[in-house]
Amino acid sequence: MENVDSKSADAKADAKYIDIRQAEMVFHTRKGSFHALRDINLTVRKGEFVTLIGHSGCGKSTLLNLIAGLTKATSGALLCAHREIAGPSPDRGVVFQNHSLLPWLTCYENVYLAVERVFGKTENSTKLKRRAMAALALVGLTHAENKRPNEISGGMKQRVGIARALSIEPKVLLMDEPFGALDALTRAHLQDELLKIVAKTNSTVVMVTHDVDEAVLLSDRIVMMTNGPAATIGEILQVRLERPRDRVELAQNPLYSEYRTSVLEFLYHRQSHPAAA
């Protein structure tokens, strides 16, 4: 009975790995207060891939920054692994829209810098180097370890940013439109690579996107945000597509089309013409 009870308790804990309760975000500016988010209630299970989607200005990045601990909610509670999110932590790795690489460092050095900051006090240099190289290998960039950011493509830079985030072995990977500035072919390739990485690491991921197809391809659940100001969660769509996922096969899958239509319906009918909803 103890083992059963223990497994049951672990399952319940995993079901609320990220727990957001009644979160509000109000920014105070010289022009007055701006109510960005209201009544945000969301739980994310351990190992789940959740995307946040909505029109520009709906608070997607603001919500991601709250989970990252980069900003503090005006009110409400945000927990990760049952601990209050009180600031940034290596437990939550962030991949920004811009790769944010240091231009004077090589790909390897950009990753090693993160590893050293997190594990430098507990591990020797050999282990730190192994961690950095393992992260580069995960995104297929060991061949570019000695290249600087100005010597590689935009897609490769973004992969270095992902490697840097993964190198610190975060419990949660937070991604803010990481592929938004890339061309369609590069974006598709990196989406496929991300699917493989998440399957291999069993990472918990929260990702901001504007791309409906990207959301359906990657997600276990899609969180659709209402328009701002005072944006909130409008709907949450469960994506019941088997993994591993193949984009060519999914193109012929009626469920894929159904999910895509549901998100488009929310974004471009109920949000663009709320009176008609």
Image (cartoon, rainbow, N blue to C red):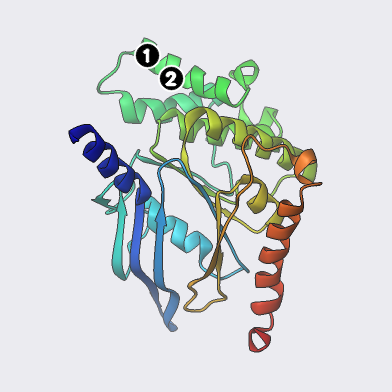
Residue extending farthest left = 2
- The answer to which quarter of the image holds residue 78 is bottom left
Give coordinates of residue 55: x percent, y percent.
Answer: 63, 69
Judge whether 118 appears above or below 41 on screen. above
Instruction: Pick whichever, 52 or 158, lies toward us.
Output: 52
- The reply to whether discs 1 and 2 touch (Cβ–Cβ < 8 Å) is yes
Query: Which label sits on residue 127?
Result: 1
For label 1, the SS is helix
Residue extending farthest front = 1
Is the residue marked by circle 2 packed among few (<14), some (14-19), or many (20+) residues within 10 Å?
Answer: many
Q: What residue type is labelled 2?
A: Arg
Residue at point 30% right, 23% down?
A: 120
Give coordinates of residue 154: x percent, y percent.
Answer: 69, 38
- Residue that mark 2 sits on: 131
Taking the image as shown, residue 35 lies to the left or right of residue 162, namely left
Residue extending farthest bottom = 275
Taking the image as shown, residue 180 lies to the left or right of residue 76, namely right
For label 2, the SS is helix
